[in-house]
Amino acid sequence: MTGPSVVVVGPPASGKTTVGTAVAAALGLSFRDTDVDVEAATGESIADLFVQHGEPHFRELEEQAVARALAEHHGVLALGGGAVTSAATRALLVAHGRTGSAVVWLDVDVSSAAKRVGLSRDRPLLAVNPRAMLRTMLEARAPLYAEVATLTVATGGRSVDEVVADVLAAVGQEAP
């Protein structure tokens, strides 16, 4: 197996960073987030990249960040919620899952996601009508997450510890 042991995908507010960080800590691995990689490479926030340069530019940067992280990171990797909209990224994730690594889809319902998002300005695609945008996004992206996932874990209405325990059990580890 090369690349990350666990890759975490899912929509905004599904818990990718929170769960990914906890899984990494439990496994004694490092955690990496491709959104952080994009921000570090550009010196701009994700929200600013969307506003200043548009979504297509950001998605191109994201695609490059995911490919780089899959090639060089060996811990737990979290992807931005829209990373799966890239066919190239999906192909990389499917191939990665075939190596024996877990690609975990953190699935969240609209109600739980809406509560978690609140009125965050850091989520550019949810700036106008968060609940309606979330519903549309979840419906449109669900088949894409399903395409790449080797494991699906529901996060709505569940504690971080419960979700982490499910992920750890799926990768053959026990929760601490």
Image (cartoon, rainbow, N blue to C red):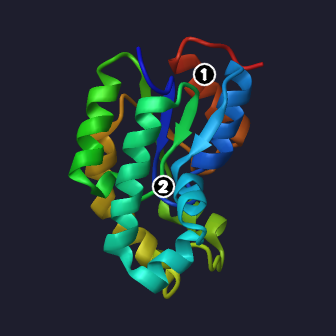
Q: Earlier in the sequence, mark 1 or mark 2?
A: 2
Viewer-nearest residue: 71 or 29? 71
Residue bearing mark 1: 168
The amino acid type found where label 1 is placed reads Leu
Q: Quadrant of residue 36?
A: bottom right
Q: Position of residue 117 (x, y in %)?
A: 62, 69
The local crowd at label 2, few if under 14, some if 14 to 19, many if 20 or more residues have their Cα within 10 Å, is many
Viewer-nearest residue: 99 or 128? 99
The amino acid type found where label 2 is placed reads Gly
Q: Quadrant of residue 133?
A: bottom left
Of all residues shown, which one is farthest toward the right? Answer: 176
Q: Position of residue 161 (x, y in %)?
A: 72, 34
Is 14 situated above or below 122? above
Residue 32 relative to residue 68: left or right: right
Viewer-nearest residue: 30 or 152? 30
Is 111 situated above or below 129? above
Q: Residue at x 23, y 39 (%)?
A: 91
Q: Quadrant of the C terminus?
A: top right
Circle nearer the viewer, 1 or 2: 2
Residue bearing mark 2: 80
Q: Quadrant of residue 118?
A: bottom right
Image mark for residue 27: none
